[in-house]
Each structure stands twice: as structure tokens, then as C-alpha cells.
Image (spheres, rainbow, N blue to C red):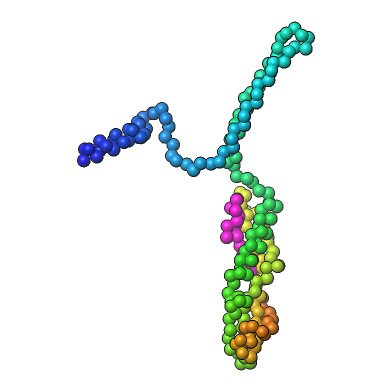
Amino acid sequence: MRKILALILTMGLASGGCAWFGGSSSEEVKPAQPQEQTAAPEPAPAPEAPAKDVKGKGKTKAKAEKPAEAKPAASKKVVKTEAQVAAELTMVGNKLAAQAARTVMPSKASKEVRQDSKGFVASYIEVDASNVTTELRPGASGQYVGFIRYQEKVMECRGKTKQEATTTASCEQVKARNLNELIRYDGSTWQY
């Protein structure tokens, strides 16, 4: 047991010095952080040759220039204008409506078929992605709420047989559902 404690103490002193015990050390131990991309410091301008006095007396004037300071990496968040956020909302709204059109069930590719008194009815849902509307409402401290509105159309195809209802029958819209999706902008991206 004493050997283990001695080993731990030796490793502690070797790796962190007296910092583990509240003492001061020549190096400050910092926790590991992910590295950020930093801009390379701008090279210092070349020193200028001394300028001679206009009267020709041989006196020189040296311009005192401050060395160029390296600019810190841009770690601040880029603040977007309301118009930029609204444009992003429109893009996200169109993307979500297109995704809904691909994933809605029953879809045109896999219709739901049921038997009716007059034959068979194949029904499916079609998302009208061409009429997507968005609305932006400001929230607290750079956050926004977005409304995405689109319409789902319920289509039915009638036929005397199941095969006819799913393939060759003409389809008509029987009802429509107006959908309103609510999403949130957290200051950098849309959360949905």
C-alpha cells in the first residue's frame, strides 16, 4: 500500500509539480481544449530607410511605427440580420416540405387500398411543396420562431379491381389538410 501511494505521489510531482497541492509552479497547467483555427499573424512591415531632411543638413527623421499586433481569432458569433434569418427559414421550410413529400405514408408509390361498395379505392397523401409559406417572428436576444405552412392533399383512385385502382385509374383530390410546423432559431441554426 505504501509503495502505491509513493508511486502516485512521485507521478503527481513529476507530471504536475506542486500545483496539485496548491503551490505555485513556473508553468500553469491548463485543461485540454479543442484547438481552434487561428489566423496566421500578419508579418511585421519592413523597417523604412531613414528619410533625409529636406534642407540637406544630413539630419534624419525616423518614423516611429508601432509593431503590427496579431489580430485575435474571430471567436465571436456572426450576428445575422433578420433578412438573412428569414432567407434561411425559407430554405429550411422548402427542405422540410420536400422531406415530408418523400416520407409521407401512404405515398403515391405505396397506396393504401380498401374495398368499397362500387369497387376498390386506392388512397395516398401528396404534399404540395410548391405552396410553402414561411413566417418569422422575433424572440428574445437574437432568437426567432419560424412558422412553415404547407398543404397535404388526400388523393383517391377508384377502380373495379385492386390492380386498376393502384395503376391505371385516374385520381382526384378528396380533401386537404393545412399543416403548420413550428421551429426555433437559437442564434446560429434552425432547430427542428
Q: Is residue 186 magenta?
A: yes
Q: Residue furthest right?
A: 55
In-front residue for pair 37/20: 37
Of residues 2 and 40, the one nearer the viewer is 40
Residue drawn at 43 percent across, 39 percent down: 31
Q: Residue at x 69, y 83 (%)?
A: 170
* Residue 21 at least partly seen: no
Q: Residue at x 60, y 40 (%)?
A: 74
Q: Residue furthest top?
A: 57
Q: Is residue 129 magenta?
A: no
The quarter holding residue 60 reads: top right
Q: Is residue 53 left or right of residue 24?
A: right
Question: Residue at horizontal 51%, vertical 41%?
Answer: 35
Whether residue 55 is visible, yes or no, is: yes
- Please, is residue 27 above or below residue 95 in the view? above
Give the main secondary structure, helix, strand or loop, of the magenta stretch: strand
Quadrant of the snapshot with the C terminus: bottom right
Residue 64: % across, % down:
66, 19
Is 21 on the left-hand or right-hand side of 64?
A: left
Measured along the vertical axis of the image, is residue 83 above or below residue 41?
below
Q: Position of residue 20 (x, y in %)?
A: 35, 35
Q: Magenta part of the protein: which range? A: 179-192
Determine whether 131 is above or below 66 in the image: below
Q: State which quarter of the image contains the N terminus.
A: top left
Instruction: Give coordinates of residue 156: x percent, y percent.
Output: 65, 82
- Front one among 24 and 164: 164
Q: Is residue 138 above or below residue 97?
A: above
